[in-house]
Image: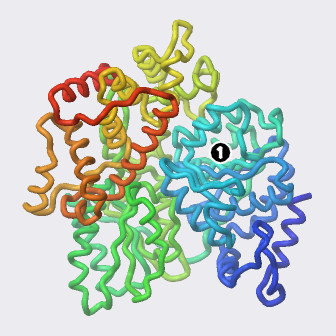
Amino acid sequence: MASQVLGLEEESGPNPGDSELAVNPFDGLPFSSRYYELLEQRRSLPIWAARFIFLEHLESSPSGVVLVSGEPGSGKSTQIPQWCAEFVLARGFQKGRVTVTQPYPLAALSLALQVADEMDLTLGHEVGYSIPQEDCTGPDTLLRFCWDRLLLQEVASTRGTGAWGVLVLDEAQERSVASDLLQGLLRDARLGNLPGDPRVVVVTDPALEPKLQAFWGNPPVVHVLGETGRCSTPVYRDTVPTDRVEAACQAVLELCRKEAPGDVLVYLPSEEEISLCCESLSRDGGSLVNQGPPPRVLPLHPGCGQAVQAVYEDIESGARKVVVTHWLADFSFSLPSIRHVIDSGLELRSVYSPQIRAESQVLRPISKCQAEARRLRATGILPGSCLCLYPKSFLEREAPPLPQPRVCEENLSPLILLLKRRQIAEPGECHFLDWPAPEALMQALEDLDYLAALDDNGDLSDLGVILSEFPLAPDLAKALLASCEFDCVDEMLTLAAMLTAAPGFTRPPLCAEEAALRRALEHVDGDHSSLIQVYEAFIQSGADKAWCQARGLNWAALCQAHKLRGELLELMQRIELPLSQPAFGSEQNRRDLQKALVSGYFLK
């Protein structure tokens, strides 16, 4: 069997001492010295002991499904994709290639970079990634990391499995809408009845394992033991601090004064608090002159873009890294150098209410599963610490056992639109790990009907088909299409990109000068026109990073909006929709823009 061949081959080599001219089977080139260095690190990961049994299950699973259950930091996200690539290689690429989904685009990008390095391959050739506004793949790509929502859109546009032979659904415990729906579609499709003998690997935290086993009909399970080392005991505060940012900063500075070895990971609820914490630590870190070089403070959130890779880089000066993040790093972004965790115990999430047809920002306790994952970040050979900025009773009394399924908290209109495009007439025909509320499904169907996306039979109308092509919420896509009628396409493209990309404003102004510069970007007509004005000023500045910093703007988010705008423009040209010349600022354009917005958002 393929797994037996691969298992024996890897256990016996390659090793630098006896196989100097060993050739990489994926590109035919000799392995570099760095490959052997990283191979030794890979072999020390907890998951490495499960390699052979995983390949056995992948080969012989009757249902074609394998469940992998393990704690964060065990190496699941980097090693499972590589073993699947070896499995496909043994099949001679005859039955598709490997696609790995991630619940966050930033995680897909980061893992692609890391795995390409470990496999000694070129990113964009044999290993690639697909995220919004960036497709770094080619005809030779064997292993692709992908945002799960992009893959869902691909599956909705095709019948069968698409171009993959092995699909790895990573971080299933995050319960993203796309991940849950992909599992429902694949279970209903019955892999054994699909051409090409496809395989599905579902990777999860142990807390969700029983539910996934029942959902998939008891497939074979690979259990991964946690990292062996000193397990930190959480230290709880007596009360919840009134100023979380200040409390977290003081805890970091105290660690630095104690000269406790290792890097620090700080969890705060929101991007705004992350930015404020980074600013404060960068300002106050210079006072630690007697404790060596000041710490290097790094934010980690969706707006960071490719700059996120800095959290993995070694610092030559020996300075401590302080990574400030939120729920994004609960299960993703395992950082081996972390020895100290500071946890606020809260998360800020957008929750949609079908009753009022609006999203609201909800500050709430994290789940017990998330709290345990955060504590395990401080596990290692060296002693670590986990400081919880809340009482122990707070977690026991208010925290749910598992993260809330996003399908129960998001607007389901985009989901229903994809299901209709997949020609599933009723949402009830698709199985969910957790069913959304019936009123949420009905409201989503009503909204699509009001937007004229459905015909009299409840199927997609011609307009609905066009709406499903856009990587936008249905109401925003409808406003963009309406702009063709009202001759304000240029402005609506900008607004759609700015509303969809990460927020351009991540924190309040820090000083009077910055506040004045930001006020100069405000428009008298309100937030929508202000967003357009910010974008145009950003482009006129030449997308200058210093210009953004002086105004407290998120440079990476504005760059993302620029890419998305180009993608939307290209899509409209491909569909042959009419465009219009820029006219922002004129009275006629102001009225036309309002009409286009009302065409999509008249239910709000």
Tag count: 1
Percent across and percent down for residue 145 are: 61, 54
The residue lying toward the viewer, choosing from 561 and 373, is 561
Which image quadrant: the C terminus? Answer: top left
The answer to whether residue 436 of the structure is visible from this angle is no
User: Would you name the residue on which mark 1 appears?
Assistant: 210
Q: Residue at x 21, y 75 (%)?
A: 283
Q: Secondary structure at mark 1?
A: helix
Which image quadrant: the N terminus? Answer: bottom right
Q: Is residue 502 left or right of residue 404?
A: left
Kindly indicate the quadrant of the structure image that contains residue 213. top right
The residue lying toward the viewer, choosing from 367 and 55, is 55
Percent across and percent down for residue 183 are: 65, 38
Q: Residue at x 71, y 63 (%)?
A: 82
For the rendered model, the colour scheme is: rainbow
Q: Is residue 77 left or right of residue 556?
A: right
Q: Is residue 90 left or right of residue 43?
A: right
Percent across and percent down for residue 302 are: 41, 55
Q: Residue at x 36, y 49 (%)?
A: 502
The residue lying toward the viewer, choosing from 277 and 560, is 560
Give the answer, above or below, for where 467 lies relative to 10: above
Residue furthest out toward the right? 1
Percent across and percent down for residue 125 are: 66, 61
Give the answer, above or below, for where 69 lies relative to 41: above
Q: Residue at x 39, y 58 (%)?
A: 301
At label 1, the amino acid type is Pro
Residue furthest out toward the top? 456
Give the answer, above or below, for where 458 lies relative to 189: above
Kindly indicate the quadrant of the structure image that contains residue 116. bottom right
The residue lying toward the viewer, choosing from 585 and 126, is 585
